[in-house]
Image: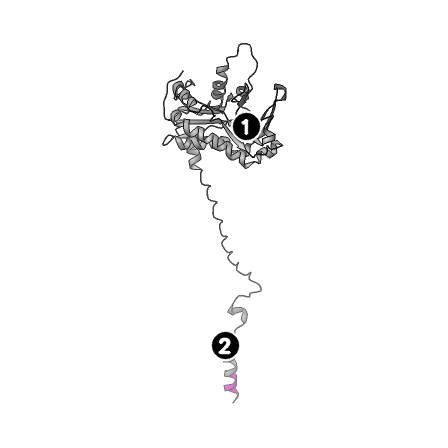
Amino acid sequence: MLRPLAVATILLACLVVPASSQSPSTADTPAAPVPAKPVAKKPAPKAKAAAKPIAAADSGPCQIGVIPALGDKFLLEHIGLTVFGNEFTDAPVESWGLDDLIFARARAVAGGQSVRRITYAKGAFDPYYNPPRELFRVARNDLVNVVRQVAATANCERYLVVVRSAGQVPGTNQSATGIGLLTNWASGTFKNAQLFAFIGIAVYDGKTFAKHEDPIGFGARLADHLSHLGRSEFFEPLKDFEVPATPEAVAGSSRLRDGARAMIAARLDKELPAYLNDVGNTQ
């Protein structure tokens, strides 16, 4: 009876194996490192699209370089009963975009020709509009000297320049300059005024800077002048109009802004085709 029991006890002892011999202790063995999640790479920033039209306009071939120089000046001119009653006041009208208008009209008229706007520093045209008093100064060189500096590195075949010019006020010995509003001693009584726009157009050779001859010609201009006898294409009457009291009010007047832009656009559309589509002779 005892022998079978002893055998069973020995067999049971053989089946019981210490836990240490079955698997390594988790307390003594360091845990396997948890693989780190791959860091999501931020997508590389997309390169900004190059302004191709602008770059091409600035660096590509240039047949016509446009230099608009009306600036932001609007003149309030009042003619008194005598010369001592004359008054002149400048109003800044940069927000009207007169130079932008010139470039837009030139580009529209140029057709398939490559057109580039030539930028320049503020005040670059001061030597032309306010030339220094010099004993041996040659006035006709004032504009071309400025154009040479402004377009020094532009490398265009021709340069179209639009500047302020001057003309006579009909029925008087007074003159008006550039873009502005004309009143006289009686204007306030009748609330009348006249918008005026005098601009000069010139084309210069891109290499020699010699000025091209007027493509319209003296005869055509004289005929055009005679066809406007009794009225002036450079003046536009404004009736029932209260003249702005301050330069700031001038800039904010939509009637003055729209009227001035319309007069400039009409003059440009009339004359630019002859200037831009004619290679022309130089003087």
Q: Residue at x 43, y 24 (%)?
A: 159
Residue 103 appearing in the image: yes
Q: Which mark is residue 15?
A: 2
Q: Locate residue 215, reporting x and y percent.
A: 38, 21
Q: Nearer the viewer, residue 281 or 273?
A: 273
Q: Locate residue 32, reporting x and y percent.
A: 52, 60
Q: Earlier in the sequence, mark 2 or mark 1?
A: 2
Relative to 164, say whether 135 is above or below.
Answer: above
Query: Helix or strand or loop: what does disc 2 sit on?
Result: helix
Q: Quadrant of residue 193?
A: top right
Name the amino acid type tagged 2: Leu
Query: Helix or strand or loop: what does disc 1 sit on?
Result: strand
Residue at image mark 1: 180
Residue 206 appearing in the image: no
Point out the stretch of residues depicted in magenta: 1-6
Does the magenta portion include 5? Answer: yes
User: Are the residues flagged by discs 2 and 1 in contact, CB closer than 8 Å?
Assistant: no
Q: Residue at x 48, y 30 (%)?
A: 263
Q: Exactly how many numbered labels are in the figure?
A: 2
Q: Nearer the viewer, residue 24 or 59?
A: 59
Name the amino acid type tagged 1: Gly
